[in-house]
Image: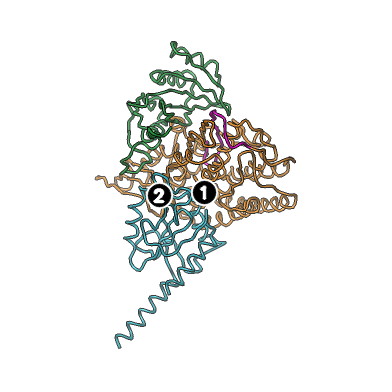
Chain colours: A green, B orange, C cyan
Amino acid sequence: MNIELMLESLRETSPTEALEPQAVPIDETFVTLPPDCIHAAVQVLVECFDLRHLSAITGEDTGDEIVLLYHFWDRHGLTLRTPLPRQNARITTLTDLIPGAAFYEREVSEMLGVAFDGHPNPRTLVLPDDWAGEPPLLRPEKRQ
Amino acid sequence: MSRITIPIGPQHPALKEPLSFLLTVEGERIVESALRIGYVHRGLERIFQNRSYVQNVHVVERICGICSHAHTTTYCQGVEALLGLHIPPRALYLRTLLCELERIHSHLLWLGVLAEHVGFTTIFMYAWRDREIVLDIMEKLSGGRVAHAVNVIGGVRIDVDQEQVRLILARLDELERQIESFLGVIQHERTFRARTRAVGYLSIEQVRSHCVVGPVARASGVDIDLRRDAPYAAYGQLDFRVITAEEGDVWARTMVRALETIESVCMCRQLLAGLPDGPLAVRAPRRVPPSEAVSRCEAPRGELIYYIRSDGSDRPARVKVRTPTLTTLATLPDQLRGVNTADVPTVLSGVDLCIACADR
Amino acid sequence: MSRIMHCIAHRIVRWARRKSPWTLHFNSGGCNGCDIEIVDALTPRYDVERLGILKEASPRHADVLLCTGPVTRQARDRLRRIYEQMPAPRWVVAIGSCSCSGGVFRGGYNVLGGIDRVLPVDVYVPGCPCRPEAIIEGLVLLLEMME
């Protein structure tokens, strides 16, 4: 996995934003991209570098925004970070490029209320059928 | 031919854990299937945010009872990376020893369950009887058969002396003889091969597109193993083979796991022979400075990944867990298509599901 | 005469039930630690079959429900339905700390916290996970209660 070449190609997909590559333990490179560039960036990784192993999609509500992290791996780790607004969080699905993202996106969707446009089967994954509350991993407004 | 829908689960003799399937069959063949998980969802990722890092070691161990040590290893590795700790070599060797013993116990457990579902109850009894040897070794080392509580943030809390090493090596020899005897039976028993050959097939393309990991991926020809590709703990010092197969069916998965078990016994011997001297743990501060880390480990079922973010307090801001079974669950509809209803337990056992891991 | 025959038949049925309690195992949301120890109790080292205990496939054949797990919301209705499908007289054994009180998961948003929130429990076997010896002791206690 050639991180430098990948970063070069990723810069071409979002020339207006700085990627801010960051080395994170353990052997992981974090890169920040705007949400509308994620699909194009993953397309580059899949088609040009055959990087198809998506380990996980992490979602976190930091209080100010919802951050999505796409963790890729091919002998070294590469994570794409993207911030989404807390209200009306939406992003394009990756299931057309990586079918294995389907379960990860369903889980982020039910836990944080993020909508994945174009997901083939956007049902709940692990929450019960009669779940009527807020998405569980959203921080309640009064908590800091 | 008309189609009938058969519900399976959450309570079913073919299932060790609650999950629910709706199988649509035409005659004897399955045409499509739908899967529902979530019966074991305990909301652990939120529980982690309300406990300290030290308390979370206890909780993380109870995500899954079968691969509990893999979970604590990955978690402790992640927190140690956040703290920038340098773990003593003796602790890494002991941590790795428990990882490999857990792999042996998990694969023997799985072999017994598969054999029982295929109808070969004798192998179920033999495999679980010999699994007791591994549980005895783990109990001698840690005091617990299933939940060991070996890992602490900063190292391990157990130690072995020369006498214990000698006894463990003797028991490993006994275990190897037992495993090889019934592996010989499985490899040559024609009815077992007939039940598992060409059942639950996954091509290499299906495995790669679903990001499948672990023995299921290796049985379809994908050569990935974090112990070799991204060595953690003491794996960088060990000499071992990564077992792969090409057939992609339940038979291939059986052979991959069986040979991995033998390989793990050899690795345990290497670890005990090369155990370095030194302390068992370093002191870890309670508060973790703001940072983030991604930690990976090769659990018995494949790549286990943790993402941990710290915010300066003594509680993690976010702990994300993705377990290997979640990746194989997505392939079950593909595996079940075209299979006979009688082979459904074989397919389900062949992937070695751990729903407690998948649901968290 | 028919009353005496009825009494004798009744005593034989009670004796047979104590000598062969058939069990059904259900995991209502546990981590699997206790579940593998329950299955372990059937294997050659512990071998509960010598006490007449068999693990059954259907609730309709079972006398005793061995339940693990802290009861998640999704599992609650299914657990209730399984218990109702068991013919009377039936008993429930809560195995493991989770099924006694919720264990480490107590307070979780999807966890009810113990089998006794849903079903009447006859024997509690604590432990995290509990050993097969403890499970056997719990079952023997249940057999004594059946007398």
Q: In which quarter of the image is residue A3?
A: top right
Per the model, the C-alpha gap separating discs 1 and 2 is 15 Å
> Would you name the residue on which mark 1 appears?
B65
Instruction: Return the x and y of residue C40 as percentages of the image width and height.
Output: 52, 57
**How crowded is the residue under tag 2: few (<14 C-alpha within 10 Å), some, or many (20+)?**
many
Secondary structure found at label 1? loop
Q: Does the stretch in magenta take in A26?
A: no
Chain to which mark 1 belongs = B
**How crowded is the residue under tag 1: few (<14 C-alpha within 10 Å), some, or many (20+)?**
many
For the C terminus of chain C, the image quarter is bottom left
Instruction: Return the x and y of residue A111 as percentages of the image width and height.
Output: 38, 35
Q: Label 2 amino acid?
A: Pro
Point out the stretch of residues depicted in magenta.
Answer: B284-303
- Farthest bottom residue? C1
Q: Label 1 amino acid?
A: Gly
Chain to which mark 2 belongs = B
Secondary structure found at label 2? loop
Q: In this view, does A51 lie above or below B76?
A: above
- Farthest left residue? B2
Indicate which label's residue lies in the foreground, 1 or 2: 1
Q: Which residue is drawn at 47% across and 43% down?
A: B357
Left or right position of A127 against B152: left
Q: Does the stretch in magenta take in B301?
A: yes
Q: In this view, does A38 lie above or below B123?
A: above
